[in-house]
Amino acid sequence: MRTVTLHDTRTGEVRELVPETPGRVRIYACGPTVYGRVHVGNARPFVVFSQLKRFLVHEGYDVEFVANVTDINDKIYVAARQAGVHSDVLAQEMTAAYRADTDAFGLGRPDHEPLASETIDGIERLIGELVEGGHAYAADGDVYFSVRSYPQYGELSHRQVDQMDQGEDVEGAQRKRDPLDFALWKAHKETEDTSWDSPWGPGRPGWHIECSAMAEELLGVGFEIHGGGSDLIFPHHENEAAQTRAARGADLSRMWVHVGMVRLDSEKMSKSIGNVFMLGEALERHGAETLLMYFSGAHYHQPMEYDEERLEEARARAAGIRNTARGLIDGPSPEWSAPLKERFFDALANDFNTPRALAVVAEWEREANRSGPGTVGGEDLGEMLGVLGLQTLMQSDVQPVSDEVAALRDERERARQARDWGEADRLRDELRALGWEVRDGPEGPELLPAA
Ligand SMILES: [Zn+2]
């Protein structure tokens, strides 16, 4: 079991991961707010923390990974109103779409995917304790966290208290004792079609308290890693940290690990800016392997550009590995492979440096290709790729397919060429139901037996 280091936002340093119980790592990563389909930028934390879990499990750690779904939020009410549907219906639909989109990576699901709407009791309990402890106050059906009651506020995001804007609507501003305070509970409004009873009247929780409660309910407090996109550091994670510490006298997590933004033309990919590529469409166009290779090609903590050049590079890398893998035989790898495998996993242990690990894979390929086809065992390469979710590059696609399956594959390819993503999706599902997974490789679509 290697010692693992990660970049911790609170200290600003790369620190050793020291589990509370040796060998046990609990991870909570903030998931999507389900008001629309997720885009490529939303997918990056899902991929990074899923890969991190696979690596820790490989090292022998016992890992519990929680990624929540925010299904009660202002954005969902607004989007549902615009679409003319009930907010519950929209949230359920978009939760299912998020699961289907991220399933396509083949990384497996997190161990728990709690919904805010199923954690209302825990949320209300936590708010009640904050009110009792003097860290929160009720005002006309709302409840606010009193930022100045908590002297360590700003510690995570390294901001001065007077440089902070909670980004909340002006509507509640007159009920706040201090403009810095943020909402834990919001009184029911006419324009919102769901509400829950509470000691402060009917309403619904604020976003930040939802995560504090979901995390505590599943992992307790003082778990090892709290993660998410770097855009969540303030106010979301600052507020989560403050609420839990104020209520429990203990830190929510030991480390805060943030994933850099995906950028388009040097700007953060974001629905509010409108510069987004939807994940479902990106998977259809490029395939899961290319996207996993693309994400793995950058260090998780750094921002990364989403452009054709980088995607092409990722595609070529995946194709290169697949080519090498075709020449391998089953069984143990030769002696020269062992030190390379060590370096691969050392790179991941050292602040989860996936680009450095991929550079070692490239060295491995060069060695194998030099040895010639049919002479090198692929076991080590499979083990390395498996941690990144790229083990499918080792599989050959030569199993015979029926005429019906081949026809569906061709029909789907035609839909893709015509950019009819809805039809392509439908045909992919049909193929999956018949036991086949489609991978869009550099030489066209390939069929693999579905897992
Ligand atoms: Zn969260």
Image: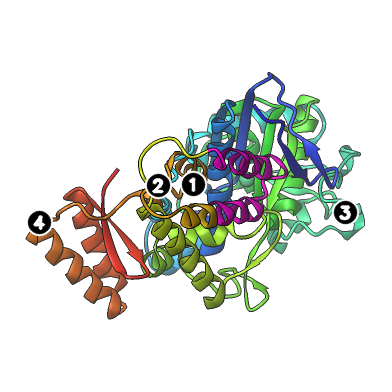
Whether residue 113 is in magenta: the answer is: no
Residue hosting label 4: 402
Label 2, secondary structure: give it: loop
Check disc 4 and give the amino acid type.
Answer: Ser
User: Rounded to the nearest whole Å, what is the CA distance between mark 4 and mark 2?
Assistant: 33 Å
User: Rounded to the nearest whole Å, what is the CA distance between mark 3 and mark 4?
Assistant: 61 Å
Color scheme of the displayed model:
rainbow
Q: Residue furthest left?
A: 403
Residue hosting label 1: 385
**Sequence-first tag of 2 and 3:** 3
User: Rounded to the nearest whole Å, what is the CA distance between mark 2 and mark 3?
Assistant: 58 Å
Could you classify mark 1 by the number of other residues whose Cα lies within 10 Å: few (under 14), some (14-19), or many (20 or more)?
A: some
Q: Residue furthest top?
A: 21
10 with respect to 127 (left or right): right
Residue hosting label 2: 375
Nearer mark to the viewer, of 3 and 1: 1
Split into 4 quadrants, where in the image is the C terminus? top left
User: Rounded to the nearest whole Å, what is the CA distance between mark 1 and mark 2?
Assistant: 20 Å
Percent x, y of residue 449: 24, 48
Please report the bounds of the magenta region as a residue range: 335-364
Check disc 2 and give the amino acid type.
Answer: Thr
Percent x, y of residue 372: 42, 55
Residue hosting label 3: 159
Nearer mark to the viewer, of 4 and 1: 1
Magenta residues, dominant SS class: helix
Q: Nearer the viewer, residue 130 or 438?
A: 438
Split into 4 quadrants, where in the image is the N terminus? top right
**Sequence-first tag of 4 and 2:** 2
User: Rounded to the nearest whole Å, what is the CA distance between mark 3 and mark 1?
Assistant: 40 Å
Check disc 1 and give the amino acid type.
Answer: Leu
Q: Is residue 160 visible?
A: yes
